[in-house]
Image (cartoon, rainbow, N blue to C red):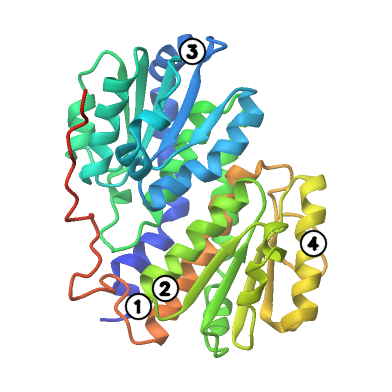
Amino acid sequence: MTVDELATHREVFQQPGVWREAAALLADRRDEVDAFLAPLLARPDLRIVLTGAGTSAFAGEVLAPALTRALRRRVDAVATTDIVSNPREVFAEQVPTLLVSFARSGDSPESVAATQLATTCLESVHQLVITCNADGRLAREHDESATSFVLLMPPATNDRGFAMTSSFTSMLLTAWLALAPGQDADLADRLAVGAEQVLSRADDVAKLTAGGYDRVVYLGSGPLGGLARESALKLLELTAGEVVSYYDTALGFRHGPKAVLRAGTLAVVYLSNDAYTRQYDLDIAAELRTAIGAENVLVVSAGESPDAWQLDGLAGVDDAALALPFVVIAQLLALRFSLRLGRTPDNPFPDGEVNRVVEGVTIHPLPR
């Protein structure tokens, strides 16, 4: 099988097209979405909780700080795995809550259990389900609920490959467009053009994997901190842990985690579009160039920056949206590292140690 025949390769490269499709699907349902969300967002005491497991949880980590700023209200990212294991802590406050669930398949045990526990623990809860699988249990259970709204992604985003790629980015884009006010009508297209710039340089990304690296560090600030975490997971998944990956924030990295640096380390720094935050990203990039050599530091930017990989046409875009074209670089790195190591990216765990849809989880009843 050639690289072009891999589902993971196809799903990475289809992203510009499915982002445009996802934005069009949301536009077609805009009146319905607004009718559901507007009364909730009008409540000053509304708490928004963004949830999912694994990569789906990291969509929430990217969005939460950006939505807090855009909506000027409390927005928390809490993984379904934390909700299921500690529901009384997560839902300790009896405040009106909008639970936004991200799920590729919607069939993982925690996805459904988290929504049920929210209903059990809270007196007032509405649920926005964003999923790639119309036949998944999560979509089916919430489709007819008067307090829920289900947003389906384009069918192609229900990735067949092991790792979430187009599913992650399409759900993230849809949530941002649905919840963040005042977004430009052409935002999805601008992001798609940015991703096309990345994909046109896929061979340049592949060359990085020939550098003898056995560990990769991803750093980002604010919403791009969540992106760094997702980037590290992609590499860990597709290389089955053979390449060590690490993530942190630009400022947090110096406080101990910098010890991960050694010969054979590639560092990727995502530069924020926020002028203030960007200063800290540039500081750590300069420090890394001194520590491990400029040739081992990849800086990614949407604005002019010396010695950075610059994506054009994205100036002024919020960091949460900027995460979409930026993550394509991490996806390509993970794919190419996997192939170079002789792994099968579509199924990096042939013995089933880790599964596409998590298995082996027992959902225990919550005592009254």
Q: Tell me if 213 is positioned left or right of 34 in this view.
A: right
Mark 1 and mark 4 in contact (Cβ < 8 Å)?
no
Q: Tell me if 112 is positioned left or right of 95 in this view.
A: left
Q: Is residue 257 above or below residue 210?
A: above
Read off the residue under disc 3: 38
Q: Position of residue 261 (x, y in %)?
A: 64, 79
Gap between marks 2 and 4 measured at Cα = 27 Å
Q: Is residue 146 above or below residue 239?
A: above
What amino acid type should be assigned to the residue bearing mark 3? Ala
Gap between marks 1 and 3 measured at Cα = 45 Å
First of labels 1, 3 by sequence position: 1
Nearest to the eye among marks 1 and 3: give it: 3
Read off the residue under disc 2: 335
Gap between marks 4 and 1 measured at Cα = 35 Å
Q: Secondary structure at mark 4?
A: helix
Q: Quadrant of the N terminus?
A: bottom left
Mark 1 and mark 2 in contact (Cβ < 8 Å)?
yes
What amino acid type should be assigned to the residue bearing mark 4? Leu
Badge number at residue 282: 4
Nearest to the eye among marks 3 and 4: give it: 4
Q: Secondary structure at mark 2?
A: helix
Q: Secondary structure at mark 3?
A: helix
